[in-house]
Image (spheres, helix red, strand yellow):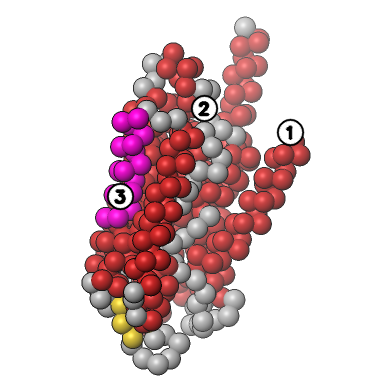
Amino acid sequence: MKLKEEMCINYERYTTRKRIIILVILLLIIIFSLFSICAGSSAIKPYQVLMGIFQKGSGLSNLVIWNIRLPRVLAAIIAGAGLSAAGCVMQSNLRNPLASPSTLGISNAAAFGANVAIIIFGAGSVKSTGADAVLIDNPYIVTICAFSFSMIAAVIILMIARLRSLSPEAILLAGIAIGSLFSAGITLIQYFAQDVQVAAVVFWTFGDLGRASWKEIIIMAVIIGVSMIYFAVRQWDYNAMDNGEEAAKSLGVSVERIRFGGMFTSSLITAAAVSFLGIIGFIGLIGPQIMRRIIGGDHRFLIPASALMGSLLLLVSDTFARSIVSPIILPVGAITSFMGAPMFLYLLMRGYRKK
């Protein structure tokens, strides 16, 4: 009886520690959200932010907060959570720590779609002769094309895996091959394009959270919210799959069906985020890796923790991009790569030393 009570106490401590970590990350997101709304070329005090959120501030501060700063912060939180959660599920389903939304070629396919929209459909042009010369004339065509091609890539990979019963390693290699195919297509399209069109494509691929309006934020929130519910429903299946396919099947888990559903949902999240915001690298790779080392491999806690860490990483990166050389806004995709690559190398080296 005493042994059972001790086991219950230890389990409560085990889960309480994880919940505290998740709450700490959530608190950090709230703090950095407030700081991010305050930061920028037009400085706003925290008191003005709180008043502006409730529409009780001055006309100018309300305009800046609701039309510029708040949509950007929400885009960072939603997209960061989606990309990181998608990376977590991909790494679990493929049993490969290097799996991420960009690894399967989905980001390359979205970039190919943007090339088609800008170069073939003429969605990019020159606005002026200044530093902001490149203009995306019709962002909705770009978004639709990027989303369509990214989902086409995801469906091709998943259908090949389903028809041929490929192993997780083979699925990853298929994604790399599809990504290379779309990269080759990008090169060919740009080779015959005008310099202005190429500049517009490069501008799109930088990744910019400022592109998202309230309409895009709502669409992303719905897609990612429904996907997160699906991940929560399947969290026990992912835990079983971590112990090996045979062990999962012995527990009644349909491994192929769960893997297909997880990969499709992760691809849908990636397609939505990339098509609206452009290429944002490393969030889906580094967020789950950090939390796996801190919180462990239990997907009941790992998936929400990874989502919150992705939100925090993208929020900090975007705030840094807007503040470091203000009023110039640096590409957030470059900041995430600069921040993520050294961090990932450190975690990789640390993991090997432990072994």
Q: Which mark is residue 242?
A: 2
Quadrant of residue 128 within the rendered picture: bottom left
- Inspect the image, locate mark 3, and give the three-letter code of the amino acid beneath it: Met
Residue 241 percent location from the top left of the image: 47, 25
Residue 247 percent location from the top left of the image: 49, 17
Q: Residue at x 24, y 67 (%)?
A: 141
**Magenta highlight: main SS:** helix
The numbered mark, 2 or 1, whose residue comes first in the sequence reads 2
The numbered mark, 3 or 1, whose residue comes first in the sequence reads 3
Q: Examine the rendered structure and indicate whether residue 63 appears above or below residue 232.
A: below
Is the residue under label 3 in contact with that under label 2 (CB below 8 Å)? no
- Inspect the image, locate mark 2, and give the three-letter code of the amino acid beneath it: Asp
User: Which element is circle 3 on?
Assistant: helix
**Nearer the observer, 280 or 305:** 280
**Nearer the observer, 311 or 177:** 177
Which residue range is magenta in the image?
Answer: 148-164
Instruction: Mark 1: give few (<14), some (14-19) or many (20+) Cα within 10 Å.
Output: few
**Nearer the observer, 287 or 214:** 287
Q: Residue at x 40, y 78 (%)?
A: 199
Q: Looking at this rendering, what residue extends furthest in the top direction?
A: 1
The numbered mark, 2 or 3, whose residue comes first in the sequence reads 3
User: Which element is circle 2 on?
Assistant: loop
Can residue 3 be spotted in the picture? yes
Residue 87 percent location from the top left of the image: 47, 45
Q: To which residue does mark 3 refer?
A: 151
> Can you say which quadrant of the picture contains the N terminus?
top right
Q: Which mark is residue 355?
A: 1
Instruction: Mark 2: give few (<14), some (14-19) or many (20+) Cα within 10 Å.
Output: some
